[in-house]
Amino acid sequence: MMINKVEICGVNTAKLPVLKEDEMKRLMIEIKKGDMEARNEFITGNLRLVLSVVQRFNNRGENPDDLFQIGCIGLIKALDNFDMSHGVKFSTYAVPMIIGEIRRYLRDNNAIRVSRSLRDLAYKALQAKERLLKNNLREPSIKEIAKEMDAPVEDVIVALDSIQEPVSLFDQVFHDNGDAVYIMDQVKDTKNTEEKWTENIALSDAMKKLGDRERHIVKMRFYEGKTQMEVAEEIGISQAQVSRLEKSALSTMRKYI
């Protein structure tokens, strides 16, 4: 099913309830007492939160039903670990948990294989990150994560980079009034530009108009970087002759460029 359809995972998203803040607090108190009905009501009342997160991943080519189910796991984990005493909104705490769960799923299903030891280190880093996020209520730095793990910062960086899911050059990075900017628009090759391709083709065609000796001189002078004296010694003529042939060759090439 497409993500923009009303129904996902058999759930009619148009009819999903939305809990108010005071209702969530009341249910949370009941949940802490072990009330399973309150727990189910709380989870159902936050499924729209999962749906909003899943929509961030709708360009990954993954089945939205699968992502929604994985997101629900993240929602349940957030509920189990949420501490009301911190005075933070549940959604503020839950969204990173849901995103993290979906990203783990995408990494585990990635076609690019990472070594087991590196993957294990990365997962430990993610667990340390979640602990620090829960305790400090802010995104931890790489140095803080490495300190929490008692591991070198460089190893943590390599491990986390190794499990990042690849992106498509056609992923949107910006969208405004129907004009989309894609990753490929942000990638620039300064060496193989369209202008240089055209220039190289023109030079190649112009070189074909030269005689064998003139073409050889031009190649040695401008492609191999040799001096006129070195060219003269190599082909057995004087430097003056090399200079004359070079000028004649360049004049001929200009007519075709």
Image (cartoon, rainbow, N blue to C red):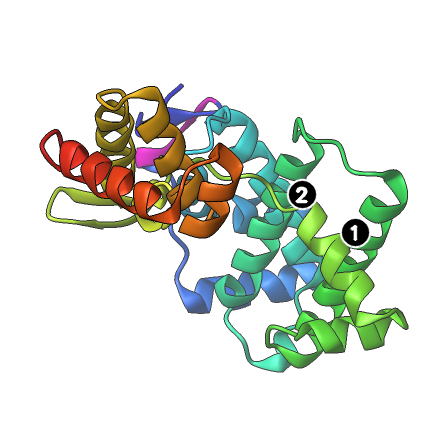
Q: Is residue 114 left or right of residue 222?
A: right
Q: Which amino acid does the dot numbered 2 rest on?
A: Arg
Residue hosting label 1: 123
Viewer-proximal residue among 153 and 73: 153
Viewer-proximal residue among 230 and 18: 230
In the image, residue 101 above or below residue 252: below
Residue hosting label 2: 104
Viewer-proximal residue among 196 and 135: 196
Residue 20 x %, y %: 39, 62
Residue 150 x %, y %: 90, 73
Task: Name the residue located 78 percent from the left edge and 53 percent from the top edge.
Answer: 122
The magenta span reads 10-14
Dot 1 falls on a residue whose secondary structure is helix
Q: Are marks 2 and 1 in contact (CB under 8 Å)?
A: yes
Mark 2 closeness class: few <14, some 14–19, many ≥20 residues within 10 Å: some
Q: Is residue 221 left or right of residue 146?
A: left
Viewer-proximal residue among 142 and 27: 142
Mark 1 closeness class: few <14, some 14–19, many ≥20 residues within 10 Å: some
